[in-house]
Amino acid sequence: MTIRAVLTSVAAWGLLGLAAPALAQSDPLAATGAWSIPERSQARTPPMGWNSWNAFRTEVDEARVLGAARAMVDSGLAGLGYTYVNIDDGWWLRRRQSDGRLEIRTAIFPSARIEGGDTSFRPFTDALHGMGLKAGIYTDIGRNACSQAYDLHSPNLPEGSTAEREVGLHGHVDQDIRLYFAEWGFDYIKVDACGINVYGPENPLVAEHAYTPVPPLIDQVSINRTDVPAVQALYRQVAGALDRYNPDGDYILAICNWGSANVRAWGKDVGHLWRTSGDITPTWTRMLHNFDSASTRALYAGPGAWNDPDILFIGHGDFDQDHLTEARSHFALWAMINAPLLISYDLRQAPQSLMDIWGNADLVRLNQDPGGHQGVIAYASDDVQIIVKTLSTGDKAVALFNRGAAPVDVTLTAAHLKFAAGAPVRLRDLWDGALSTFTDETTFTLAPRQTLVFQATGERALPDGVYLSEVPGDVNVAVDGVVAPEPDPVVHRMRNVWGETRGSGERPTYAGWGGARADATPYDEALRIAGRGFDTGIGVLANSRLEVRNAGYTRFEASVGVDDSTRNTRDSVRFAVYGDGRLLAESAPMGFGAAPAALTADISGVDVVEIVARSGTLSSDLPLVVAWGDAALLR
Ligand code: GLA
């Protein structure tokens, strides 16, 4: 393990509020001078492509997948960047007991039948590679997969004895990863988590189907009952095997544990993307739920590591060709928050109106902007949101999002864009190309569920630098100070399409509450120090450390202090700025009510700036909320 890896794992332990293992006695807040997310060559921008699940569930087959691939190439979608063609659940037949090798269901993937009785996906991946595309496969981190619990009517469930039907990675990580990548030539893997979630001994399904009972490591409604380090360790094992069998690093690891196990804090250290919620369904309110689970977490994503609110459902249900307003909103929102753009529709017969949505080159471009800055919520309410994303050109993309069922007037201000008042702002509508200009503010009337998206050009409010909250892709939350992960109450809780209104309702589920936020406190309040409000800044808990990549700026500046929203009004905190591991500036200890203090540091020639808010041992269990008001890098 390198020093950096040790420190990263210490940070991860600290972040979970757990006693670190004996090895990890070092201080997780100590500046390392390094960017601690692995530098990955893959997924520098959010993965794009196609996935079989929302279109076909387990009734995936070779003709459908290759048909989608062909359509992607012929229609020009592939040329826009839709590259990965991912098979989801349903492909497997059994695990051969003589040697543990997985067998493919050749009834649906006929090209997998090879001489000598083995099966291989190599002809299939060759076909995709031959089209200039990449190939993705699906597995589970446990013994059994999700379909074996949830799709019991499927004709494509694994067959045979208990052991033959154990098609997940459990006990076979190296063997399976080697098979998928080194032998079969896949480029992407989605690793689901039903095997460590639904096959508990108390589930009647387990006896009925003679599955091996597995005490759940994940309890989706209780973070306290979830074994976070154990879940993390299993996914790290997969990442390790991928490194071994793909020495050139040409793979993508998609963690699919539905926002459980506090994955939103550690997913970036282990995989290229991680699901932030349960499955999307083709309903408007479920889409809101999935969107909300990722949209507040901009600081946790960046090049090589993305929040994943799930596969697109465009073309189905509330997002079908008769609901183009909703379908466009779904696409624009995914684009704005740097979600993976994975189409899941039978592309052999897609109407042009849907092709035009997936094929909107402007929206794809903003999703794929190399800066990797996820959109940040500039205006928050349950009815309307304004989301602003910084593009690497310095322009902004802005989405005006009507979440509700009634028309609404939405006023966009230059301040939302962090553009100067009094100067013209040019807007280009990314749906119809219309150009317009405004100064200070402008108002649009949005239809129910409509999302307008613009590219905006204007004079920056901060002419000689950039606010940290504008460039979340350059910020890594190494330690976010959360000692007891709590469920996030601002994720929209829709009537559940599976259970309908049985039970007691949809309660907050996903840990993430209290994590670092751009332009808000960790609890979604406005930033404010001693009565002075900050529209711009980073809100985080004390005992946190954030890494910031510096692309040639010479000065760091912020107004720091304890945030007025803090429930801990007793303890104090010291703010420090490090450059490549060296202390550059430090505040005096500051407590609740102290006026914001200016903190400035010379960061000339520094590659990694670290901003640390340190309290030491808190006298209270209540979280101490701090603000880096107007935190900026200046030329
Ligand atoms: C889980 C995942 C889905 C899909 C199914 C397959 O529900 O979250 O995305 O892969 O399993 O069974």
Image (cartoon, rainbow, N blue to C red):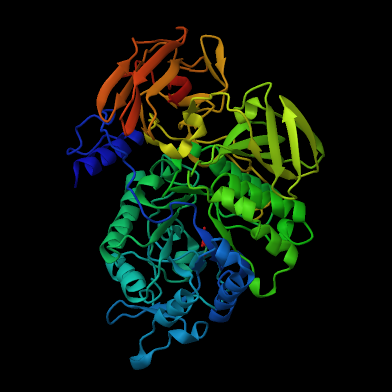
Report the residue that reaches farthest toward the bottom: 116
- In this rendered view, identify the residue nearer to me: 332 or 424: 424
Q: Pinpoint residue 390: horizontal percent, then vertical percent.
A: 55, 38
Q: Is residue 31 above or below residue 528?
A: below
Report the residue that reaches farthest toward the left: 23
Q: Pinpoint residue 100: horizontal percent, then vertical percent.
A: 30, 76
Whether residue 309 sits left or right of residue 301 in the image: it is right
Whether residue 557 sits left or right of residue 296 in the image: it is left
- Image label count: 0
Residue at image location 71% in from the left, 57% down from the top = 319
Q: Is residue 384 above or below residue 207?
A: above
Residue at image location 36% in from the left, 44% down from the top = 228
Q: Is residue 534 above or below residue 187?
A: above
- In this rendered view, identify the residue nearer to me: 399 or 487: 399
Quadrant assignment, res 312:
bottom right
Question: Is residue 124 visible from the viewing direction of this image?
Answer: yes
- In this rendered view, identify the residue nearer to me: 36 or 224: 36
Q: Pinpoint residue 136: horizontal percent, then vertical percent.
A: 45, 67
Whether residue 474 sits left or right of residue 101 in the image: it is right
Q: Pinpoint residue 568: horizontal percent, then vertical percent.
A: 44, 16
Q: Is residue 552 above or below residue 93?
A: above
Q: Quadrant of the C terminus?
A: top left
Question: Is residue 227 visible from the viewing direction of this image?
Answer: no
Quadrant assignment, res 33:
top left
